[in-house]
Amino acid sequence: MSETKQSWLDSLLVYKDIRMLRILLLGAISGFPWVLIASSLSLWLKEEGLSRSTIGWAGLIFGVYAFNYLWAPIIDRVQIPLLTKKLGHRRGWIVLMQLIILLSLIVWSFINPTQNLALLISVGLVIAIASATQDITVDALRIEQINSNEGKSMAAGAAMAVVGWWTGYKLGGVVALFTAEFFENMGVADYWQATFLVLGILIILMNIGLMFVHETIDFNRVSNQKATDQIIRDKLGYNNIITNFVAYITGTIGGPIISFFKKNGLAIALGILGFVFLFKIGEAFLGRMSIVFYKEIGFSKGQIAIYSKGLGWITTVVFTLLGGIMAMRAGTIKTMFFAGGLMALTNLIFAVLAWTGKSELLFAIAVIADDITAAFATVAFVAFISLLVDRTYTATQYALLASIGTAGRTTLASSSGALVDWLNGDWGTFFIITTVMVIPSLICLWFIRNKVKIGAK
């Protein structure tokens, strides 16, 4: 019994590691740009009198996040002149993207949305691209803070990264809204433009904090990448400018994929990809239609705000940290099986709510259970793919695996509304179907559970 208590204490103490504080900062750096292109931009356009459809179409700039893996190989290979030498490979890329976002905010501060909407959205797209590129580098630097054999620390780091992202997004949003309201009450005509300048100061402060995030110079990564290039040159049979260029491009793009399949073998690699694609589909189907269900069953916006947003934030932070502890104690594989079971149970609670009718107590239980499930699932998933990556291609492999997971949720879950319509609004049956959707991913996970090569099982 004492050994179990000590193990729990040891797991909790992992969060005291100074690296966890650095990872929290990296998460905040990653989450903050969403304040700019999500809530702040939408509210700015709304208060300028633009239509809901225009505001909705402006949200298309978020599409770049689903495709950032396409240029992830560049992040792994290309060094930024001056910045890489002074700051390191990862931090150099992050600072460059932060500078682009900062300059974009300065440009925004001079724009009138009603007169220059196209320019405003274009600058928003620049911010989105810089933020999506930054995410690739932040994830790589976060993973590289932890040694590949430190499974517990990687799980704790995954939890801190998620908490950091939400902190950057939520607290950044609070600062943006209060600052805009302050300038508006002060009688500043272009109060949103002034607000973006203040948010630019936060970006500068984040970059100062970034200087305390250590980056280990990994000479093996560079040498391994060059070794891959040499293998390709040898296969080509020539050594000249053209073959060197072909080897470099092929190694940059194909190296991460070759490494992944070579490390795991074809069958296990396909099992991993199947699991990553399918894991959160049931949750995504539920999430996409949940607020529609709440309204149709008779809950008010106030009730939805209290339970889904207010309690949801507290629940997410607390259970994200607890999920990290469970992943440390039981391992990422077992935690994902547990999270999968929670997904199924949560969806069944929603089915019961649909069948019994409006019940505020059952509604609160369902929403809190959904937030707990999301917290556990996200931590386990982030820790799992973090442990899978080859340190030679950290940025590319993580971005690719994360994008595959995103693709599964966004592509298939887009038909969730059509499924409810096909069922003639039978929400109970819909939630039962989303429960069954959890099973295929767990079958994939069962197949690979003892064979996948990660730092901690």
Image (cartoon, rainbow, N blue to C red):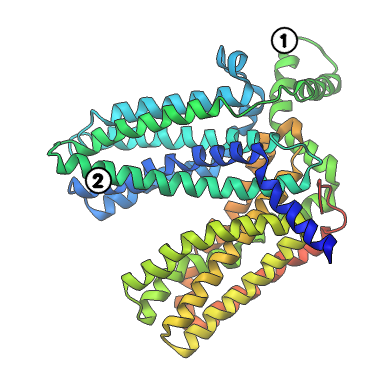
Which mark's residue is nearer the viewer, 2 or 1?
A: 2
From the viewer's perspective, is residue 128 above or below residue 209?
below
- Looking at the image, the residue that sits furthest to the top is 240
Q: Position of residue 44 (x, y in %)?
A: 25, 44
Crowding at mark 1 (Cα within 10 Å: few <14, some 14-19, many 20+): few
Q: Which residue corresponds to the image point at 78% horizontal and 41% vertical from the top-left?
A: 260
Q: Looking at the rendering, which quadrant does residue 300 occupy? A: bottom left
Q: Which mark is residue 45?
A: 2
Q: Position of residue 424 (x, y in %)?
A: 44, 83
What residue is shown with label 1? 241
From the viewer's perspective, is residue 426 above or below residue 196?
below
Q: Is residue 112 left or right of residue 251?
A: left
Picture quarter with the N terminus: bottom right
| Amino acid identity at mark 1 | Ile
Of residues 398 and 246, the one nearer the viewer is 398
Q: Mark 2 and mark 1: span between their CA atoms?
A: 51 Å
Q: Position of residue 34 (x, y in %)?
A: 42, 44
Asked which secondary structure carries label 2, the reply is: helix
| Amino acid identity at mark 2 | Leu
Q: Are marks 2 and 1 in contact (CB under 8 Å)?
A: no
Q: Is residue 293 left or right of residue 105?
A: right
For the question of whether residue 77 can be seen, the reply is yes
- Please report whichever mark, 2 or 1, sits nearer to the chain's N-terminal start: 2
From the viewer's perspective, is residue 298 above or below residue 166?
below
Asked which secondary structure carries label 1, the reply is: helix
Q: Which residue corresponds to the image point at 87% horizontal and 57% vertical from the top-left?
A: 450
Q: Position of residue 316 (x, y in %)?
A: 53, 59
Q: Which residue corresponds to the image point at 74% horizontal and 26% vertical from the top-left?
A: 251
Picture quarter with the C terminus: bottom right
